[in-house]
Amino acid sequence: MPGNYKQTVAPTAQPITRAEAKTHCALTGDEDHDGYIDALILRAAEAIEKILNRQLLSATWTLTLDAFPDEIVIGKPPVSSVTSIAYTDSAGDAQTLAAANYQTSLSTNDGPARIKSAYGLTWPATRGDTYGAVVVTFVAGYADATAVPLTIKHATAFLVAHWFRQRESVIVGTISSELPEGLEMLLAVEDWGAYA
């Protein structure tokens, strides 16, 4: 999607718990791996978000554009709300667009959220020589871990277990094979066909 995305408020949870990850890794004793497992969960969730072009748990983002397009497309499903649309007007002053001046079609798992001007209205003029003249603030992601699709939860656990067992980039002394094939199958189920 055109524009620059920046996460401004990170999620406060992850798609799986440490206990779920440890079960998938077959860790049953009192081994002190908790910090490492927590780090792997975070990295796995970030990797899956990038692969799927999706936000897993609720977070606040900004989308920055140089001007108003016909339709603003937010490619971070699922989007639950648009908090604000700020812009630099043609005089160079900062403005916030009233919510009544635009309409939204919020996203589900299957695609981006869309925003266009309200019926009978057009987008306001922005200053043409200003990068980032339009800033859309929105909330994306599932409300909590119970709402995350099971295939994504399993893919997260799959990656954590793979990285926990294989800590180097090369496996020596075995026949080479592509280990994350199962991951590709799991994520293909949740791929909404993002386009750039």
Image: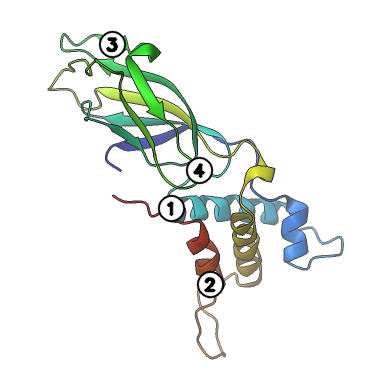
Is there CB contact under 8 Å for labels 2 and 1? no
In the image: residue 115, left or right of residue 44: left
Other residues around mark 4 within 10 Å, as few (<14) / some (14–19) / many (≥20): many
Name the N-terminal-most of marks 1 and 3: 3
Residue named by callout 3: 94
State the image coordinates of residue 187 (x, y, percent, origin top left).
51, 61
Is there CB contact under 8 Å for labels 4 and 1? no
Is there CB contact under 8 Å for labels 1 and 3? no
Q: Amino acid at mark 2?
A: Pro
Is there CB contact under 8 Å for labels 4 and 3? no
Residue named by callout 1: 192
Mark 2–mark 1 Cα distance, whole angstroms, equals 20 Å
Is there CB contact under 8 Å for labels 2 and 3? no
Name the N-terminal-most of marks 2 and 1: 2
Q: Nearer the viewer, mark 1 or mark 3?
A: 1
Name the N-terminal-most of marks 4 and 2: 4
Q: Nearer the viewer, mark 4 or mark 1?
A: 1
Other residues around mark 3 within 10 Å, as few (<14) / some (14–19) / many (≥20): few
**Dot 4: element:** loop
Give 186 or 87, whichever is nearer the viewer: 186
Mark 4–mark 1 Cα distance, whole angstroms, equals 12 Å
Mark 4–mark 3 Cα distance, whole angstroms, equals 29 Å
Q: Identify the disc placed on residue 180.
A: 2
Q: Amino acid at mark 3?
A: Ala
Mark 4–mark 2 Cα distance, whole angstroms, equals 21 Å
User: Which residue is at the far front?
Assistant: 119
State the image coordinates of residue 90 (x, y, percent, origin top left).
16, 12
Mark 1–mark 3 Cα distance, whole angstroms, equals 35 Å
Residue named by callout 4: 55
